[in-house]
Each structure stands twice: as C-alpha cells, then as structure tokens.
Image (cartoon, grey):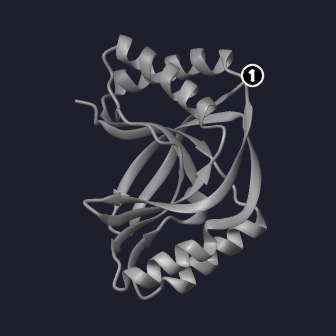
Amino acid sequence: MMKSKRVFIAINVELSSDLSRVFQELKDELESDRIRWVPENNFHITLRFLGDLQPDQIEIVKLILDEVCSKKRAFVFKLYQVDFFKHRGNPSVLFFNLDRVEDFVCLSGTIQKRLNEKGISSNKKFTPHLTLARLKEIKDLSNFYHVVDKYREIPTQEIKADRVIFYESVLKPSGAEYHVLDEYQLS
C-alpha cells in the first residue's frame, strides 16, 4: 500500500527587506512568549489545505491544478498590516493581511469546486493571509496587543501571484517541512 501524504496548495511569498525587518522586530519584541515562528523561507498563502491524500488522489489534484491554473490570470496583491486570529478568545495566529482577497477567493473556490467534483474535500473556511507565527502561550496580553498595534501599519509590499505550488507538509518536532510536489504557472 502506498503511503499517503499531507498536502496543501499555496502561493509562495518572499518578503521585501522592509517586511523582513518588521518580521524580525516582531520576533524580538515577543521573544518572552511561547510562539512558533514560521521560517521565512516557508512563507506562503494557503489556497487549500487537503490533509492526507493517497497517491492516486495526489495525481488527480495535479491534473486539476494544471487545468485550473492554465486558465487563471496572474494577479498582484499587497501585504499591508499585522493582525491576528483568535481561538476561544485568545490570540492564536499572527499574520500579515493582504488585499485583493477576491482574487484569492476566486482561485481557491475554483480549485475547491473541481476537487469536490472528484470527491476530494479540503478546509471549508478560506481567509487569505500570510501566517507569521502560531501563538502557543502569550504571557503578557497587554504587551502583545501593544506590539501588534505598533506594527499594525507596516510598509506595504506588492507581490505578483503568478505560480501556484502543490506542497507536501512533513511534520517534524522542529516544525513542518515543506516539499514541492509540483508548480503551476498562472497565465
């Protein structure tokens, strides 16, 4: 029996030097909290998280991505502020916000629709964002809110989304490792 793989579909992001500096400053200012920071070379915007798929399902996903991406146009979006999601009232994920959300929603929705037709499901709710960190334990909430407020307005960065990447995510004690299974050009 072939082994399943934990997979997701995403758009890669490379930070400008300005945003890279903001990211480093956030890490420095929040260093006393238990936070799992995403390594900068792993930055991406998830379009669809599919979880564990069998090899035959992975081949179906590749065909779908090939078909969908060949018909979708590349688009430009901006990273523009620091924000966070809450889980049960506590901050849980720190992220950079982005504009042009409708382009992401449209691309993600098209992929989802085609996957559904083939019986492959994925995460339902889709909120495009660039995850910076998973917040395990914030010791001083007022400091956390202060730091986020201080960096809420950041230099914006324009990014061209012209490739979709199909990743395998391998969970390790040190954090997830991503392996590119395939990439697809947007037209």
As helix, strand or loop, the secondary structure at mark 1 comes to loop
Residue at numbered disc 1: 187
Q: Position of residue 180 (x, y in %)?
A: 54, 42
Left or right: 181, with 152 as reference point: left
On the rendered image, what quadrant is the C terminus found in? Answer: top right
* Most foreground residue, 28 or 80: 80
* Most foreground residue, 75 or 84: 84
On the rendered image, what quadrant is the N terminus found in? Answer: top left
Q: Residue at x 44, y 37 (%)?
A: 126
- Which amino acid is tagged 1? Ser
Q: Is residue 139 above or below residue 82?
A: below
* Most foreground residue, 16 or 169: 16
Hey, which quadrant is residue 121 in on the image? Answer: top left
Q: Position of residue 84 (x, y in %)?
A: 46, 61
Q: Position of residue 78 (x, y in %)?
A: 71, 48
Q: Residue at x 48, y 51 (%)?
A: 178
Q: Is residue 56 above or below residue 135?
A: above
